[in-house]
Image: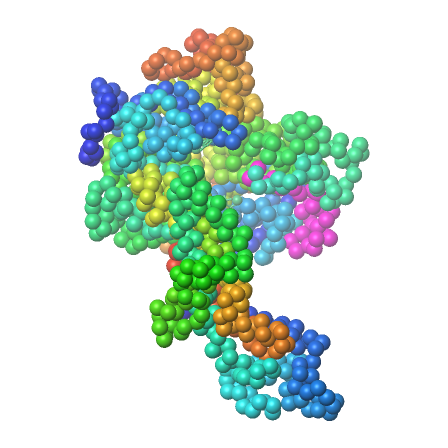
Amino acid sequence: MTTVSWSGEPGTSRGPGPFLSVRDLSVEFSTEDGIVHAVDGLSFDLEKGTTLGIVGESGSGKSVTNLAILGLHDPAHTKIGGEIWLEDQELISAGRGTMEKLRGNRVAMIFQDPLTALSPFHTIGRQIGEVYRKHKGASKKEARDRAIEMLRRVGIPQPETRVDHYPHEFSGGMRQRAMIAMALVCDPDLLIADEPTTALDVTVQAQILDLLKELQQQFGTAIILITHDLGVVAGTADNVLVMYAGRAAERGTVREVLREPRHPYTWGLLSSMPRLNSSVDVPLRPVRGTPPSMLNPPSGCPFHPRCDYPKLAGPELCFNQRPSISPETGHGDACYLTLEQKRELRTAKTEDRA
Amino acid sequence: MNETLLELKELVKHFPVRGGTLIKRQVGAVHAVDGVDLTVGAGETVGLVGESGCGKSTTGRLAARLLEPTSGKILYRGQDISHSSRKRLKPIRPEIQMIFQDPYSSLNPRQTVGTIIRGPMEVNDINPSGGRKKRVQELLEIVGLNPEHFNRFPHEFSGGQRQRIGIARALALDPKLIIADEPVSALDVSIQAQVVNLLQELQRDLGIAFLFIAHDLAVVRHFSQRVAVMYLGKIVEIGDRQSIYERPRHPYTHALLSAVPEPDVSSEPRERIRLAGDVPSPINPPSGCRFRTRCWKAQDKCATEVPPLVRLSGNREGHLTACHFPEAPTTQGEDVVLDPALA
Amino acid sequence: MTSYLVRRVAGALVILMIISAITFYLFYAVPRDPARAFCGKICQPETLALIRHNLGMDEPLFVQYWHWLVGIFAGREFVQFGSCPAPCLGYSFATQEPVFSAIVDRFPVTVSLTLGASVVILAFGILTGMIAAWKVGQPLDKIASSSSVIGASLQIYFVGPLLAFYLVDTMQLIPRPSYVPITENPLDWFTHLMLPWVVLSIIFTANYTRMTRSQMVEQLAEDYVRTARAKGMSSRSVFFRFAWRGAMIPILTIFGVDLATLLGGAIITEQTFSLHGIGELAVRAVQNTDLPMLLGVTIVGAAAIVLLNIVVDVLYAFIDPRVRLS
Ligand SMILES: Nc1ncnc2c1ncn2[C@@H]1O[C@H](COP(=O)(O)OP(=O)(O)OP(=O)(O)O)[C@@H](O)[C@H]1O
Ligand SMILES: Nc1ncnc2c1ncn2[C@@H]1O[C@H](COP(=O)(O)OP(=O)(O)O)[C@@H](O)[C@H]1O
Ligand code: SF4
Ligand code: SF4
Ligand SMILES: [Mg+2]
Ligand SMILES: [Mg+2]
């Protein structure tokens, strides 16, 4: 465990609970066009040593949520509500100094495009080393040795020479490995990976996902894996959170959500994806329409303009009242259909497809 | 098989790399496409898969004759168009159309949707009965957009809708062959499915042949009757959909298939192959078999002899593989994990 | 690096050759006959022809150019003026002094003026731009931004005399601008050039303040800056260790382009403060249709700009490791 001083932050203690707990998070941006409600009433928990996959299409608020955990939003244009607890520390109300000590140290992040996310002006070794120096007070020499060790750990060949190279001299897969090395250099408790493989080829994606799993087994890091690909989640995560329009549509274990999806949006996502073994003669079943603008999210259930079942669930409810995720714990979803209805509809769908 | 529409024969495209002191001279070449043989029949859909930089787009642009090949032949309906002049190409141009990956940059932001779709008709001086405007509205309707929207600008549409505009533009001249370069890669899953369905409908209803380029193996499988797998400028395996996905023989095809993340938690164990490192540079491709630097079956022969693309015994007709030591035709149970540090 | 420099210098020579050929053609194709100026009030056609011959002006233009070019490297003999050792840019028609030595005499003035102003522009412009970006939207930013707008709208020949009147004549804060060679007395060199530097840099500085500010703001929104913040870097080190490099690249590019304008500004400044620099030579040469002088000044000016651009490119590679000088 790392040593971060928690003292001097009044009112920030809490009884035992999950390792990370996001409660009723909302993030609003004020822009020229109006207020963007990027995240609205989102809650989830994460336990140590487990991986939570956050899935959703672009614009559903995945990145915004996780930048909020790290406190990386520009306070001048952003309004953040709710609570984020990392063990007994509340992060939204935490001061700037506290957050700077936390970032890169207890909580680290990997971004989608490793080329733009690494500084083109500094060597890989320096970029990894400076995190270590900043948080551990290491000397230049120690930081460099540590950087070499980290590069070796993430499987970069000849780390002793590679450490002095610049990002543009690395291939895409190696850059992402370097990015992971940088994120893990202080042995963080929580790693947030924002679409870490979206910019990579399948074979390299498989390498990187394997690497993340391996490192997690070794060091017990909790991981939030953001992706738009349910396939990536299936092989890597323990729990899933499906996001739609800044809200949670469904949550549960990977098994629960992929085998018995409950929310019509999850069904839509799954039936949109062609599989390696699905029948090729039937057309795909996409969700109709397009995702809503977050400037003006739909009233009621945000999915209702694209949903086929408001009639079944009760149009009054669907159109006017926000469904909240239920049950409170375990496999839950935010939809007014009854469990019975969902089961029937899903069975009908699978039979249709087969 | 029905009439052959497009035939690529030992097609090669090298892009020169320049350097040197004082006078720039060619110091090497990007071997983007290096001996590709491929045919597309009338009304047929052929998929082209492979990792980034392996030459898919270059092949596509050669097939549309947007690029001139370094060597080899491009035959369209039996006519050699490899080095044809603009004038000679003119009658053929309308029949081969392209759809691009990026729905944002492939449409001119200062033109209305109507102007964009009308463009190819004007360039090729084609006047459909009922007038161009009516045709534009018809096309918008076909691709599932509101025909009244021909006066709007691209930025007023979402990514998926823009891709539909690109498709409408490609359809404007009743093409016989559409080369679709990653038409759905930039789209969200649900939108991607909408566009794939649209393309499939068009293909069936209008009998258009497709060269469908993508890196997503599941999408390619869904869309294409035949599939070619590319690696570093060469086709390493080609065959009908079933052969490639169910009885692949090339180690690289195995590796690709095993790397596809599938949203299943219960399916029977698939083989798990993890390649080491990345694709080598196409400026200096490995000798012999280009896959040998990442292949777990590589032997001395692989470094000295280029494996020919041939039908292996036990394979169906038309299923060709370029490998000296092919894999068994199954995708189950094998487990190969290479240490990336060795790459 | 060396091979890069060799290549660049060779390229620069070719460019200068082309520039000189074009200027040569443009200048010597003017309808006014410079030989006329040597011929006196009553000018016999025979005398005029003789003068033209002595000046080498009776030959085809490209032969004249060739002589001129050869003169630079090998020196040349003039019937009119006698021998002119290499590098020879010919003799001034107006003062009959060798062009090259005239330019060499004036060069330190213009170089001091331009380089000094460059330092002021870059140092001051970048500094204020940084401050503005650091305090985006706050009063300090507003002051920096609005004063830069005012600065950009000023003119040298207006500000120059104005400042001279107040600072030199009325308040006697600084000495009247003149040129003291740096080798003679560095302090005097400095104090006597202070006012010209400030005047010349005022209009440019404003531009660099604005550019630095917008470039910094842009860089701060880059992914790699977000990564640095996600690593726990403090805002200050993100700002001064990461973002500035990215911001400097376009600024250097613009500066390379601005050098020519800056040289033009230096000429106006010299005029304003009666400094005896290249500018003065140029202006006088224009007035006198002194073609050799005009050509010489143009070529030396162009050479300076081309050279400084090579320096800028080397700096470029220094800041951005992706740029390789090979
Ligand atoms: N005009 C060009 N000049 C030089 N090299 C080029 C040029 N066009 C393509 N290449 C190179 O040729 C190779 C093949 O490029 P191509 O665009 O065909 O790949 P691709 O398979 O379509 O990749 P992706 O999946 O990333 O789209 C790459 O190494 C690329 O960098
Ligand atoms: N800085 C910002 N200002 C205004 N709107 C923003 C900002 N960042 C994100 N958004 C908006 O918030 C929504 C969620 O974005 P994001 O979390 O990035 O989506 P994703 O799920 O693709 O990661 C989007 O509608 C996006 O446009
Ligand atoms: S709440 Fe209503 S609109 Fe929303 S997903 Fe359920 S059925 Fe559809
Ligand atoms: S030819 Fe050799 S190196 Fe190439 S794929 Fe076959 S076994 Fe591997
Ligand atoms: Mg995102
Ligand atoms: Mg491509």
- Residue B103 shown left or right of residue A16 in the figure: right
- Above or below residue A104? Residue C18 is below
- Residue C264 shown left or right of residue A244 in the figure: right
Q: Is residue B152 visible?
A: yes
Image coordinates for residue A35, horizontal then vertical, percent: 48, 26
Q: Is residue B294 visible?
A: no
Of C11 and C242, nearer the camera is: C242
- Above or below residue B83? Residue C297 is below
Q: Quadrant of residue A12?
A: top left
| Residue interval drawn in magenta | B76-103
Q: Furthest residue to the front?
A: C170
Q: Residue at x 40, y 48 (%)?
A: C130
Q: Furthest residue to the right?
A: B129
Q: Is residue B93 magenta?
A: yes
Of B157 and C80, nearer the camera is: C80
- Residue B241 shown left or right of residue B297 in the figure: right
Image coordinates for residue C191, horizontal then vertical, percent: 39, 65
Of C153 and A83, nearer the camera is: C153
Q: Residue at x 41, y 42 (%)?
A: C140
Q: Is residue C172 magenta?
A: no
Image coordinates for residue B296, horizontal then vertical, percent: 36, 45
